[in-house]
């Protein structure tokens, strides 16, 4: 666990450095704690508010990383991106944040206990992306989520874990109360396939979600309007279905809330799945390392981390748009 703790400490130091670079434009809030480890540690779950308070309140956009503790390249992609857009001497400095046009709220490490323990799951052995309690239609056995034991991967748990509750608290605090906004949130993962995917709901069913026309329009905007052609866009269920997807639960929760409270906002969660299997042929030894298939080979790491800057930048700027732009 010591090496994992050192890695987590490095990420926390970079989060503090980002806050220092951003000055008054960056604030660190604590959303909650991780599940307690066997050694008795409970790790704080932090989020970064980046932008003016007015922009955070009216034009928020979210990024989440580190839901699975082994997928650390996603954490590094997000931290690199934040440094890229808030340093005034950076070529990627995002003036829209300083001008109050967009507010960015980021959870860089959603599962700090998993990072410290070097596990996909949280310290209770629960896979957070199988933890929502939703049953899928025809999910693949085992990989799609199992309820037998936390000694095996993809354990669903029996109720929402502290990390999952912290994510819901984050969404409720920053997004779910707004009445007429576009509310994009991107969850960064890695380790599936040889190409990069951008998924939208649902993971539970192949039935299209209510906002499929908006997602399709966004996919066209990214692929053709911004030339992000490396990604395969579509609902996650086109690739595979799973039980317990948190974004399915929170997306449906917001749809129900919007009906009751007559909200016109569009909550639009997306998942960036970085395909880290593409370099297995040139570096097959990564198959035998615990984190190998979830992260690029060492010689490709820097290139991978910096590749997503432009896509993330365009994603953040979605918060400037109006609901009418997409409907």
Image (spheres, helix red, strand yellow):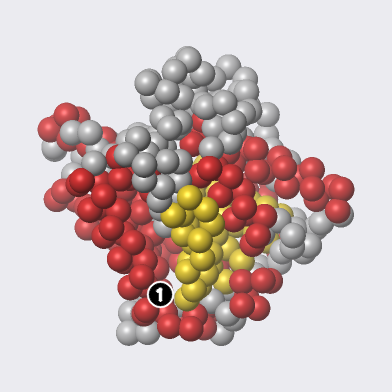
Q: In this view, does 29 lie above or below 139?
A: below
Where, by quadrant of the figure, is residue 293 drawn? top left
Where, by quadrant of the figure, is residue 154 drawn? top left
Could you tell me which residue is drawn at 26 percent across and 60 percent down? 10
Q: Is mark 1 on a helix, strand or loop?
A: helix
Q: Can residue 320 be seen in this view?
A: no
**Residue 85: image x %, image y %?**
40, 74
Please tell me which residue lies in front, 297 or 246: 246
Could you tell me which residue is drawn at 25 percent across and 38 percent down? 291
Q: Is residue 98 above or below residue 18?
A: below
Q: Is residue 147 above or below residue 244?
A: above
Q: Is residue 76 above or below residue 277?
A: below
Please tell me which residue lies in front, 242 or 107: 107
**Residue 277: image x %, image y %?**
27, 36
4 to the left or right of 96:
left
155 to the left or right of 245:
left
């Amino acid at each position: 666990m010591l090496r994992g703790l050192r890695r987590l400490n490095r990420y926390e130091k970079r989060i503090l450095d980002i806050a220092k670079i951003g000055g008054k434009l960056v604030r660190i809030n604590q959303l909650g704690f991780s599940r307690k480890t066997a050694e008795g540690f409970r790790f704080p779950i932090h989020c970064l508010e980046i932008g003016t308070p007015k922009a955070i309140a009216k034009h928020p956009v979210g990024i989440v990383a580190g839901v699975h503790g082994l997928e650390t390249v996603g954490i590094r992609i997000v931290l690199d991106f934040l440094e890229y857009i808030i340093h005034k001497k950076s070529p990627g400095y995002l003036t829209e944040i300083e001008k109050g046009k967009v507010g960015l709220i980021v959870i860089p490490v959603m599962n700090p206990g998993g990072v410290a323990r070097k596990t996909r799951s949280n310290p209770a052995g629960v896979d957070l992306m199988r933890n929502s309690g939703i049953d899928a239609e025809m999910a693949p056995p085992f990989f799609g989520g199992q309820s037998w034991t936390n000694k095996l991967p993809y354990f669903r748990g029996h109720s929402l874990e502290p990390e999952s509750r912290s994510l819901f608290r984050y969404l409720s605090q920053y997004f779910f109360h707004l009445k007429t906004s576009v509310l994009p949130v991107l969850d960064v993962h890695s380790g599936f396939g040889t190409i990069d995917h951008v998924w939208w709901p649902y993971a539970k069913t192949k039935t299209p979600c209510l906002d499929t026309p908006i997602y399709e329009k966004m996919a066209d905007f990214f692929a053709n309007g911004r030339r992000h052609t490396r990604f395969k866009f579509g609902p996650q269920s086109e690739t595979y279905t799973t039980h317990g997807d948190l974004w399915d639960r929170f997306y449906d929760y917001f749809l129900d809330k919007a009906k009751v409270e007559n909200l016109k906002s569009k909550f639009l969660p997306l998942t960036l799945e970085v395909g880290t299997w593409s370099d297995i042929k040139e570096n097959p030894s990564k198959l035998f390392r615990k984190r190998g298939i979830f992260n690029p080979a060492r010689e490709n790491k820097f290139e991978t981390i910096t590749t997503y800057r432009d896509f993330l930048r365009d994603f953040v700027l979605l918060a400037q748009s109006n609901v009418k732009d997409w409907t």
